[in-house]
Structures are given as C-alpha cells and as structure tokens.
Amino acid sequence: MTPKAVYWDMDGTLIDSEPLHEKALRTVLTSLGITPPPDLHDRVVGIAAVPVYEMMRDELGLKLSFDDWILRKYVYYMEHVASLKPRGGAVEVYRDLWAQGTPQAVVSNSDRLIVEANLRVIGIDRPGMKSVTRNDVRLGKPDPEPFLRAAWLTGVDPAETFVVEDSHAGATAGVAAGMNTLFWPQQPGDEAPAGAILVSSLEELRGHLRLD
C-alpha cells in the first residue's frame, strides 16, 4: 500500500534525542537529592510528560510542581540540543517523501518548544510544516488522539496513513488510531506491539513507504 500521508515520531525516530531526555531527567533528579532508578529510560521512553512527572512524584518522592520540574528539564535540554544528530537515514526518507509530494506531520509527546528546536537542529523545519505536540492535545501517546489530530490536519483517512515510531507507547497509539504503524526500534530484537509492523532496517522502512 502506498501511503497517502506519513506521520513521524520525533524523539528517537527522526532525531537521536532520547539519551539527552534521559540525561536531563537524571540531572534534575540528582540535583534534588533523588537517585534515579536504573530502569528510568525503559520506564519513560515515549511517554508523555505528565505521566512521567506523576511517576516521579508518586514513586521517587519528587516535590516540585509539574511546571517547576518541566522548566528545569527543558533548561538542561535546550542547553545541549545543538549537539544532537538525526537518526541515521531518517531525514533522508523524510525529504524523499516530501520531494514526491506525500503529506507528512511530526507527532510528538514533547512540548512545541522542544519539537521546534529539534526540527531546526536536523534541518527540516519549513513554512507550513504540520506538527502535533503535547500542547495541542488533551491526551498524549499511547492514546491515539495525537495521530488522529495529524490525520485531521492533513485531511487523510487514518486507514490510508503510515506512522513511523521507535517506542511501544507511540506504536500503540498509531495502531489505536487505525493507522499502518511501522515500529522502527532503536534496540535490535525489540518486539513490536500488537498490530504494528516491525521494521529492522532503513531499507525495510523505505520499502514499506514505497521508496525502494
């Protein structure tokens, strides 16, 4: 099936930013005297900011308000964002789809501040680009709302669209939205959520998107 539109996750899919997000979380927790758990990355990857905050508040004893916590995290992130690189091959696929006229959108659980900074770093921000961020929806991934909003923005039937995701939360959201969901994990051997298609290489990704 040739996609009528493609919706990209940002962190970990278009840009290799998950390590920086984790470092920002760990730095803030450590500065407050809280020892980050060893499995912090696995517990927060792909999850929206509010559930992450609630976990740290309820399980780790974080005392800050949500606004104070997210401000500290984003100050650290923005100080280091210029060092980030795109995920290998992802931007090239994005540009090839753009060149052939396929509608695309970036759909992220991050705030617009972070999404726009990431887009500038990897050089794909442009006028008229469509994106859905944490600030645009009531519920983030794994809820399907962010992807359904992207379908509304592009005017394409969800069943004729493709989602590209690296996290279980994001892929679960794509499946729940009724979209053809490509799970392209960072870690080899990571199994796809039910209903998603496992993509093990850049070549497979291009094939599914009819770019081979």
Image (tube, grey):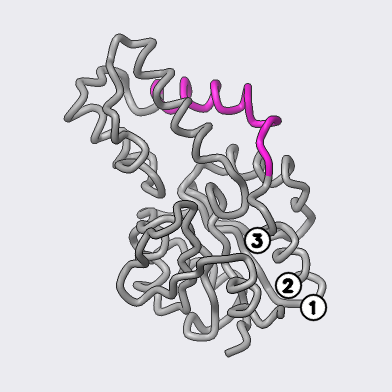
Element carrying mark 1: loop
Extreme-left residue of the structure: 59
- Does the magenta portion include 74? yes
Which one is nearer the viewer's eye here, 38 or 50?
38
- Residue 112 sits inside the magenta stretch: no
Q: Which comes before the other along the chain, label 2 or label 3? A: 2
Q: Position of residue 5 (x, y in %)?
A: 62, 77
The reply to whether discs 1 and 2 touch (Cβ–Cβ < 8 Å) is yes
Q: Name the residue beneath numbered marker 1.
A: 100
- Which of disc 3 and disc 1 is earlier in sequence? 1
Residue receiving disc 3? 130
Q: Which circle, 1 or 3, is nearer the viewer?
A: 1
On screen, residue 91 versus residue 39, left or right, reads: right
Vertical comparison of 133 with 84: above or below: below
Residue range (magenta): 68-85
Identify the amino acid type marked 3: Lys
Residue 180 in percent (x, y) is at 47, 79
User: On the image, numbered disc 2 is attached to which residue?
Assistant: 97
